[in-house]
Image (spheres, rainbow, N blue to C red):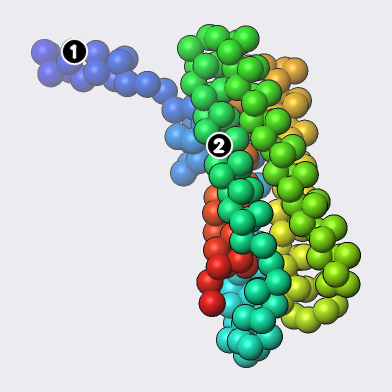
Amino acid sequence: MNRIEISEHDAAREPSLPNPGWGPLSALPGNPLMWVLILSEMLVFAAFFGMFAWLRAGEREVFDASQQLLDPVAGGLNTLVLLTSGLFAALASRAIAAGEVRRCRQWLGAAFALGVVFCVVKVVEYADKLGQGILPETNTFFTFYYLLTGFHFAHVIFGLGLIALVAWKVSHDNVETAAAFWHMVDLIWILLYPIIYLLR
């Protein structure tokens, strides 16, 4: 009898899953459909990275020479900017969990502002390359440079729109959902930056 009572007491104290009924996604914060989107996008990027590595093996000299034309400092700056923005998104999630709506909006605003800085740096970099006559059809490396960074850029723009919407419609689930997507954007760039700018 005592064993049953203890089990029931423990069960009562056990926190419920954020999204019951979603299988492996049940324990993840935010909207499960966002996690489905995140996983699918990660698979797409993984396929692009694999194709990039395969083509690079066949055109190593072209890829190495083209990579020298990129600015690793700009890419590194954007890495720092995006990681800091991701930290602010995490702090927004912590604030809303504590019921601090105003503080949550402030952190979301800071994350948004750094996301805009990322976009400005990237646009300046694109303008520089285009000004030099470096286009997607210049060679295979730059085809993938524009494809991968452009695809990521589109995700940043979508993420900024999501953050702005969530800052307007603040709720715990909304903030967690936007933060999850923004962390995915961070992760992709952390992988993309060394692959495109650094590794030889």
Residue receiving disc 2 = 84
Q: Residue 33 or 148: which is nearer the viewer?
A: 148
The answer to whether 48 is drawn above or below residue 107 in the figure is: below
Q: Where is residue 171 in the image (x, y as percent from the top left)?
A: 63, 17
Residue kind at label 1, given as amino acid type? Glu
Residue 46: which quarter of the image?
Answer: bottom right
Q: Can residue 109 be seen in this view?
A: yes
Q: Residues within 10 Å of mark 1 (few under 14, many from 20)?
A: few
The answer to whether 194 is drawn above or below residue 183 in the figure is: below
Identify the element where label 1 is drawn.
Answer: helix
Which residue is found at the position 75% from the left and 18% from the top?
A: 168
Q: Position of residue 33 (x, y in %)?
A: 64, 39
Q: How far apart are marks 1 and 2 (CA)?
A: 48 Å
Which residue is found at the position 61% from the left and 48% from the top?
A: 77
Q: Where is residue 59 in the image (x, y as percent from the top left)?
A: 65, 88
Residue receiving disc 1 = 5
Name the side, left or right, on which 97 lies relative to 186.
left
Foreground mark, 1 or 2? 2
Which residue is found at the position 56% from the left and 44% from the top?
A: 80
The answer to whether 65 is drawn above or below residue 155 in the figure is: below
Identify the element where label 2 is drawn.
Answer: helix
Q: Residue 14 or 90: which is nearer the viewer?
A: 90
Q: Residue 179 or 34: which is nearer the viewer?
A: 179
Residue kind at label 2, given as amino acid type? Thr
